[in-house]
Amino acid sequence: MAVYTQVSAEALAAFLTRYEGVGELVSAKGIAEGVENSNYLIDTTAGRYILTLYERRVEAGDLPFFMALLDHLAARGLPVPPAIKDRDGVAIQTLAGRPACLIRFLPGVSLTRPSPIQAHTAGAALADLHAAVADFDGKRPNSLGVTAWRPLLERCGADLDAIAPGLFARVDAALARLEAAWPHDLPACVIHADLFPDNVLMLDAQVTGLIDFYFACCDLRAYDLAVMHTSWGFDPAGAPLDGVGAALMKGYGDRLSPAERAAMPVLARGACIRFLLTRAWDWLNTPADALVTRKDPLAYLRRLDWYDAHPEAFA
């Protein structure tokens, strides 16, 4: 979450009149966390909501897929926030020249340093998500999958070395190894693809919300778990958290096939490359006046180094 597009109080108040029962605007606060879309925490006379304006990597043509996925998961009892439909039954709106949705607020907090028990619960929630999409027929390719990483590396180019000397060469070499080893015949389904701790809301060890599905796509199921392992198993600086990665794997359970488990070291290194590159691109290209917290690309280089040094992590 972030704020790139400023919306006036008058425009927000007018926007809310499109909906039945959401009340009148009391306050609105921009949310600085995240890097993809503009988000506001909206309080009204009827309750609390999240307003999202879609920017940057989110294509307007993908929004019906995301909305259908959220409706599907909510209907199966998962704690996800489907968009609210207006008086005419429309979920996807336009505000300040951007596609926009009003989304129900879910209770809970996102974690900075998850415990093993919290990671265990989150891993089980991902398993529940994968089970719930078994009969979802929506399709969306992964626009940030393995085939997209080399073009993104080339777009960043030598500017990567402004982040850290020699970074381009290190990523180039690591990516070449991954491209040669990447598995293509593992089970696939619709995945979240970005289930970081800040996209899971929790109260103690209970998952109360799975949010920000705007990278959801069809890809390898085990890659989704690898993305979680790289984000949950380390602190924000990239140092491993004792017992957390193992607890996440145990929470996911025995759903992985032997081939998927054998591929996890490669998939985890791939997740490191993916987030290193997108963070680097954002680091180099985020507007100076955007209300957004840039994330350190080198935290994912440290994770990549850890996986290289610990091939037994998923044994």
Image: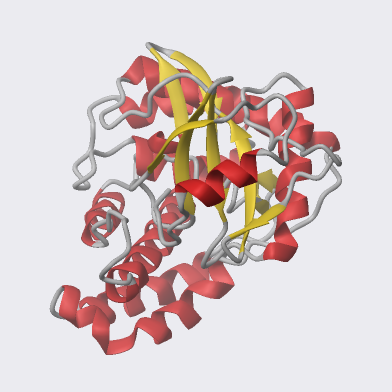
Percent x, y for residue 299? 23, 54
Question: Quarter holding the C terminus?
Answer: top left
- Closer-to-camera residue (247/55): 55
Identify the residue at the far front of this view: 10
Q: How many marks?
A: 0
Is 96 placed above or below 288 here? Answer: above
Which quadrant of the figure has residue 248? Answer: top left
Horizontally, residue 253 falls left or right of residue 313, namely right
Q: Residue at x 40, y 79 (%)?
A: 153
Q: Residue at x 45, y 43 (%)?
A: 40
- Closer-to-camera residue (221/107): 107
Percent x, y for residue 104? 60, 29
Horizontally, residue 72 falls left or right of residue 220, namely right
- Closer-to-camera residue (222/108): 108
The way the protein has been coloured in the rendering is: secondary structure
Percent x, y for residue 152? 45, 78
Is 90 placed above or below 47 here? Answer: below
Horizontally, residue 22 falls left or right of residue 291, namely right
Taking the image as drawn, is residue 221 in sight?
A: no
Q: Residue at x 39, y 52 (%)?
A: 2
Percent x, y for residue 168? 27, 81
Q: Residue at x 61, y 36 (%)?
A: 103
Taking the image as drawn, is residue 201 in sight?
A: yes
Which quadrant of the figure has residue 176? Answer: bottom left
